[in-house]
Image (tube, rainbow, N blue to C red):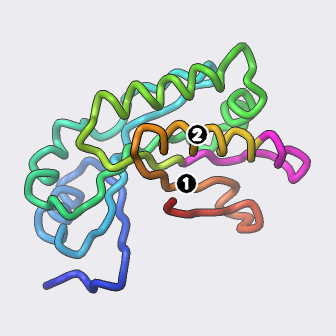
């Protein structure tokens, strides 16, 4: 089976189970992007590797060179983490930006990052949230990488956005 040339199909590696490996092994020809669902940001801006081990993905990186591999950074929908990043509480945003650079440098074979920050707050927070995402965008682009973002409350689609830029 071949991937339609006019379609982008993204998958994430958050399960880390047999099925995930089967899909990556057998269906990689249909995928355009894979988010390596491994990176968790804390309220101080530090990024930890807590999900699927990156080393388990490397055979698929080699097998499917057409896939754009993205480092997925998540906050697990914890509003206080998003707030700390948005408000730069105790330098959390500054640390977060430095951490993004660190993981891009650690995994230079990746095409970019996937930002999965949820529960960013009300519309009144949009100026600071936009400033945060602009800063992330500028940092990632300066590294020559791409960015995919998902933000907001998945239950209330009015706060939800996604884009590959």
Q: Residue at x 55, y 54 (%)?
A: 149
- For residue 56, the mark is none
Q: Is residue 102 above or below residue 25?
A: above
Badge 2 element: helix
Q: Residue furthest right?
A: 124
Q: Residue at x 69, y 36 (%)?
A: 82
Q: Position of residue 151 (x, y in %)?
A: 64, 53
Q: Nearer the viewer, residue 77 or 135?
A: 135
In screen coordinates, is 122 left or right of 130?
right
Query: Start and end of the magenta stretch?
Result: 116-128
Query: Dot 2 corresponds to which residue?
Result: 136
Badge 1 element: strand
Q: Residue at x 8, y 58 (%)?
A: 63
In screen coordinates, is 79 left or right of 165?
right
Where on the picture, by quarter, is residue 101? top left
Question: Badges 2 and 1: C-beta atoms under 8 Å apart?
Answer: yes
Q: Nearer the viewer, mark 2 or mark 1?
A: 2
Q: Residue at x 13, y 85 (%)?
A: 1
Query: Dot 1 corresponds to which residue?
Result: 149
């Amino acid at each position: 089976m071949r991937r339609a040339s006019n379609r982008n199909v993204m998958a994430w590696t958050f399960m880390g189970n047999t099925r995930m490996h089967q899909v990556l092994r057998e269906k990689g020809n249909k995928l355009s992007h894979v988010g390596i669902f491994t990176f968790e940001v804390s309220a101080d801006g530090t990024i930890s590797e807590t999900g699927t081990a990156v080393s388990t993905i490397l055979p698929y990186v080699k097998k499917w060179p057409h896939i754009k591999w993205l480092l997925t950074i998540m906050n697990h929908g914890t509003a206080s983490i998003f707030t700390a990043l948005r408000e730069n509480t105790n330098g959390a945003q500054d640390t977060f930006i430095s951490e993004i650079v660190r993981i891009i440098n650690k995994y230079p074979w990746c095409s970019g990052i996937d930002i999965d920050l949820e529960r960013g707050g009300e519309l009144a927070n949009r100026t600071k949230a936009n400033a945060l995402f602009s800063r992330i965008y500028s940092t990632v682009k300066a590294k020559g990488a791409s960015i995919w973002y998902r933000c907001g409350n998945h239950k209330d689609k009015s706060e939800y956005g996604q884009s590959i830029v």
